[in-house]
């Protein structure tokens, strides 16, 4: 997949080691936490490098996008989870869609909420 344009990055400190945080990430993101390929509708799994990186991508008429989670040790029982979003929005419809999804703050709200759910599940 070609390199998409950077949208944003959100991070959250989690009071759990990386292994526990990884399992929480799978419980929140995947339909079946035992199978990383069961990502949400609209996405396809790119990478599931336990316990460090989980990446997925997707596309539809108005955009091509990817969401990457990276887990970094912050101590023996602390992990930083970063969610990096990249996307391209081609054409007039893409620009309108970007304004609705990114410009409205909806995307940032959803990603931060997802990070909060991962922290709570860990």
Image (cartoon, rainbow, N blue to C red):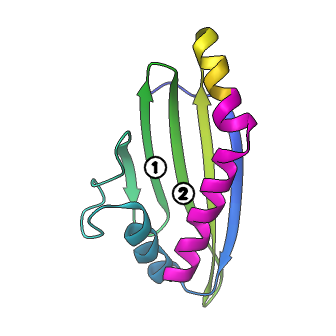
Looking at marks 2 and 1 on the same chain, the residue that comes earlier in the sequence is marked by: 1
Region rendered in magenta: 99-122
Relative image position of residue 99 (x, y in whole percent)? 71, 28
Can you tell which quarter of the image residue 57 is in? top left
Can you tell which quarter of the image residue 23 is in? bottom left
Q: Look at the numbered disc 2 and give the secondary structure of its residue.
A: strand
Marks 2 and 1, how far apart at CA? 6 Å
| Residue bearing the label numbered 1 | 55
| Residue bearing the label numbered 2 | 69
Quadrant in which the N terminus is drawn? top left
Disc 2 + disc 1, Cβ < 8 Å = yes
Q: Residue furthest top?
A: 91
Residue that appears at 45% across and 80% down: 19
Q: Look at the numbered disc 1 and give the secondary structure of its residue.
A: strand
Residue that appears at 53% across and 50% down: 68
Residue that appears at 46% across and 83% down: 20
Relative image position of residue 60 (x, y in whole percent)? 42, 25
Residue that appears at 53% across and 46% down: 67
In this view, 25 is above or below 40? below
In this view, 48 is above or below 73? above
* Residue 117 part of the magenta segment: yes
């Amino acid at each position: 997949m070609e390199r998409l344009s950077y949208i944003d990055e959100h991070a959250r400190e989690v009071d759990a080691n990386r292994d526990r945080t990884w399992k929480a990430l799978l419980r929140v993101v995947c339909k079946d936490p035992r199978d990383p390929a069961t990502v949400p509708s609209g996405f396809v799994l790119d990478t599931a490098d336990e316990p460090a990186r989980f990446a997925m991508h997707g596309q539809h008429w108005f955009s091509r996008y990817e969401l990457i989670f990276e887990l970094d040790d912050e101590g023996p029982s602390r992990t930083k989870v970063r969610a990096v979003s990249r996307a391209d929005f081609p054409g007039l419809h893409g620009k309108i869609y970007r304004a609705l999804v990114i410009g409205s703050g909806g995307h940032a709200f959803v990603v931060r909420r997802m990070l909060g759910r991962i922290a709570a599940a860990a």
